[in-house]
Amino acid sequence: MNASAYRAVIKGTGSALPKQRVSNAQLAERVDTSDEWITERTGIKFRHIAGPGETTATLGAAAARQALDSAGMEAGDIDLIIVATATPDQTFPASATIVQDILGANGCVAFDVAAVCSGFLYAFSVAESMIRAGSAKNALVIGSETFSRILDWEDRTTCVLFGDGAGAVLLSGEMGERGVLATKLHADGQHNQLLYVDGGPSTTGTVGKLRMKGQEVFRHAVTNLADVMGEALDAAQIDSGDIDWVVPHQANARIIHATVRKLGLAAEKVILTVDQHANTSAASVPLALDLAVRDGRIKQGDLIVLEAMGGGFTWGASIVRF
Ligand code: UT7
């Protein structure tokens, strides 16, 4: 067990999914694709698609409420809300302020973090740093996305890969052995044309659609994720053999398996939800974490690794004593 210290501890988790669930076969009715291709290349079987009234902020608030409930806290206890998203409700204000208003946590610090699929890891790291610095005590860190609204539904190479959803954790500062042990983050802007949205307020004045060179992203993902997990383990002085669970970003089952193989970790230690949710970008890590906590796999005291990689490129990993 690691030494006692003041750390940011995950006290609660939550998640939310849009009502509409779409199978590969249903998608194949409107897109030139097949269940076989999607399953074989990605591991995806289903995704949830937001309907009227379901937005990044409403899904994020629903996930946050669950996280509050599971921590036994109320909105008034929160002094920091960070929403990680690449699909905010509006260009501004930050979706975090909309979530704040829905929850009734008005007055606390609230802002968004944009690091696409790594957004949750970035937001988690900012919240953890603010807690350790003493500028926050109880923080809601939310990953929430409605990627269905920035997909080009004529582009089969991307539209089959993504889904909508939200996940949240409640982080609290406390003394003890639990909490965030180490986090490592990276970005490399020279690759920003491999995964991007072809619009924005300051360029086209439009929202734009997602574009990706999948194969190149795939190659970088496996190398970067294995490297950053290794760095985080070193920083936490943890042997990979001591890890109980890996909670990866859910972009592609092949990426996830190749990454954990590189680290010599058993496939049984991986929380896999890509089959049910597809790639929900910043929501995927907290969504997967919440499911595994609720179904009893991840228990208090377990040593877990969170990892993600996405547009920018951005990537990161965090080692947590749950
Ligand atoms: O979350 C951010 C990080 N994102 C990722 O990590 C995504 C990384 N990339 C990937 O997951 C994979 O590269 C993809 C799943 C996007 C693609 O898999 P791939 O094995 O790299 O396939 P490919 O792009 O090489 O395409 C192979 C073939 C092509 O046909 P030809 O040229 O070989 O005749 C495509 O046109 O598959 C075809 N194809 C499809 N066929 C049916 C591409 N998309 C589809 C589709 N259905 N939806």
Image (cartoon, rainbow, N blue to C red):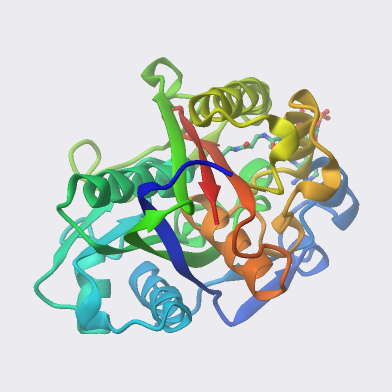
Which quadrant of the picture is home to ligand 1?
top right
Q: Residue 150 lies in what quarter of the image?
A: bottom left
Q: Residue 190 lies in what quarter of the image?
A: top left
Q: Nearer the viewer, residue 210 or 262?
A: 262
Q: Residue at x 62, y 60 (%)?
A: 288
Measured from the top left, where is residue 299 in percent x and y? 65, 65
Establish if 311 lies above or below 79. Answer: above
Left of 173 or right of it: where is 215?
A: right
Left of 43 or right of it: where is 259?
A: left
Q: Residue at x 77, y 52 (%)?
A: 32
Measured from the top left, where is residue 118 in percent x and y? 46, 41
Q: Residue at x 49, y 44 (%)?
A: 117
Measured from the top left, where is residue 238 in percent x and y? 61, 32
Establish if 216 lies above or below 68. Answer: above
Measured from the top left, where is residue 189 in percent x and y? 37, 20
Q: Nearer the viewer, residue 236 or 56?
A: 236
Q: Nearer the viewer, residue 266 or 95?
A: 266
Q: Nearer the viewer, residue 286 or 89?
A: 286
Q: Residue at x 33, y 59 (%)?
A: 174
Is residue 249 at all visible to an observer of this figure? no
The number of discs equals 0
Left of 3 or right of it: where is 300?
A: right
The residue lying furthest to the top in this view is 190
Q: Residue 82 lies in what quarter of the image?
A: bottom left
The residue lying furthest to the left in this view is 107
Say which quadrant the N terminus sits in.
top right
Say which quadrant the C terminus sits in.
bottom right
Is residue 90 at all visible to an observer of this figure? yes
